[in-house]
Image (cartoon, grey):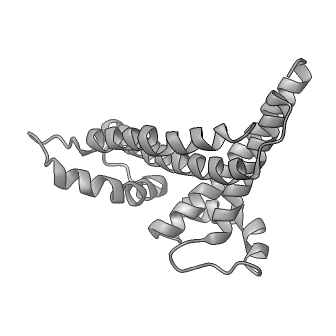
Amino acid sequence: MNTYFEQALFFLMKTVIDVCFFFFLLRFMFHILRIDFYNPFSQFIFKVTNPILIPLRRVIPPHPKVDFGAFLILIFLKAFEFTITCLLKLHAAPSMLSLLIWPIGELISQMINVFFFAILLLVLQSWLNPKNFNPLTTVLIQLTEPVLAPAKKLVPTIAGIDVSPMIAIVILKLLDILLAGPIIQFGASWSY
């Protein structure tokens, strides 16, 4: 990318893709984790993603445990982003193998990041305003429970302080480094 115009265009494209990816990732995770459908925050995510997902469901019906339509949109968005990045930075199209592997690694990494930041937000909320429960807090609790519950069993509360978020964050970051990182690296290595 040589010109400022190309850099600005790349930034705008990446921002739009990342925002869309975030909404569909939350939709995908909400379906898997059975997040309260009637929560106002959940309703927002569903309403934002429905215009694309509902027509897609005519072709790919949802499964009770996994929303395959949302999954395919997530893979498509990351594959598209990877293709544009390769074209602009490497001046070459990525291989089909890299377009299959790299987005899966990115999806795993971004799911780990959602858990990571949800835990951080929940911890901050508990420190700053512990008695305030709002729709977002409820979603954060439901979202982080599958990650925090095993950590709470591993390390019980110490002197009234719950250290399970620290344990969960360390494990999440290790998973990102040891699981998602190699998949992303492997996918990127086939791009040229």
Note whether 82 is above or below 96 in the view shown.
above
Q: Position of residue 13 (x, y in %)?
A: 81, 39
The C terminus lies in which quarter of the figure?
Answer: top right
Q: Position of residue 100 (x, y in %)?
A: 68, 54
Residue 35 seen by the camera: no
For the point 33% across and 43% down, the residue is 171
Q: Position of residue 59 (x, y in %)?
A: 76, 79
Note whether 48 is above or below 18 in the view shown.
below
The N terminus lies in which quarter of the figure?
Answer: top right
For the point 49% across and 43% down, the residue is 113
For the point 69% across and 47% down, the residue is 98
Q: Position of residue 92 (x, y in %)?
A: 84, 36
Residue at the limit of the structure toward the left, as seen here: 159
Residue 9 seen by the camera: yes
Q: Tell me if 92 is positioned left or right of 79 in this view.
A: right
All told, the count of numbered labels is 0
Depth check: give the residue in front, 190 or 15: 190
Q: Quadrant of residue 74?
A: bottom right
Depth check: give the residue in front, 103 or 153: 103
Note whether 19 is above or below 135 in the view shown.
above
Q: Tell me if 58 is positioned left or right of 1 in this view.
A: left
Depth check: give the residue in front, 68 or 40: 68
Depth check: give the residue in front, 136 or 154: 154
